[in-house]
Amino acid sequence: MAGVSMFKRFVEPGRLALITFGPCAGKMCTIVDIVDQKRVVVDGPESVTGVRRHMMPIKRLSLTDFRMKVKRGCREKTLKKALTEGEIMKKWEATSWAKKLKTQETRKNMTDFERFKVMAAKQKRSKEVKKALKKK
């Protein structure tokens, strides 16, 4: 196994990443440039994901499998074009990871009454399942 890399997701320009900490937590960004071993420059672009171009520690990012072919330090216009041509955001939203995050966000923003309705529906389903299993 010498010479075979285990890692598939590298910190590289064009890599789509999820911000896990800070004011932009939960938003998607693209790595635009590498500053040093611990920091990178990321950009949303702001019109697409709401993340402006800024420097960020790598520790605060979760790398995804998606990557665009862009050069280091590319302009926002070039980045936006690469995102739309590759339909990267659509591909991301189709992943189970993105769906799970969306579900968490929905549950977090529920009102008391919505939470109550979910609880009642769970109880009803549980009762139906028990009844169906009892018959067998």
Image (cartoon, rainbow, N blue to C red):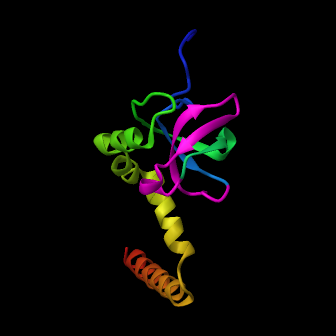
Number of labels in the image equals 0
Question: Is 5 in front, or is 11?
Answer: 11
Question: Is 75 in front, or is 103?
Answer: 75
Task: Please provide the residue range marked out in magenta.
Answer: 22-51
Which residue in the rendered view is the most extreme toward the bottom? 113
Residue depicted at 66% across the width and 39% down the height: 58
**Where 136 sits versus 46, above or below?**
below
Which residue in the rendered view is the most extreme toward the top? 2
Residue depicted at 53% across the width and 38% down the height: 31
Residue 40 sits inside the magenta stretch = yes
Q: Quadrant of the N terminus?
A: top right
The image shows residue 73 at horizontal and vertical percentages of 51, 32
The image shows residue 72 at horizontal and vertical percentages of 50, 28
- In the rendered image, which quarter is residue 70 located in? top left
- In the rendered image, which quarter is residue 35 located in? top right
**Where 22 sits versus 3, above or below?**
below
The image shows residue 81 at horizontal and vertical percentages of 33, 42
Question: Is 93 in front, or is 87?
Answer: 87
Residue 79 sits inside the magenta stretch = no
The image shows residue 108 at horizontal and vertical percentages of 57, 73
**Where 103 sits versus 86, above or below?**
below
Residue depicted at 57% across the width and 88% down the height: 112
Q: Quadrant of the C terminus?
A: bottom left
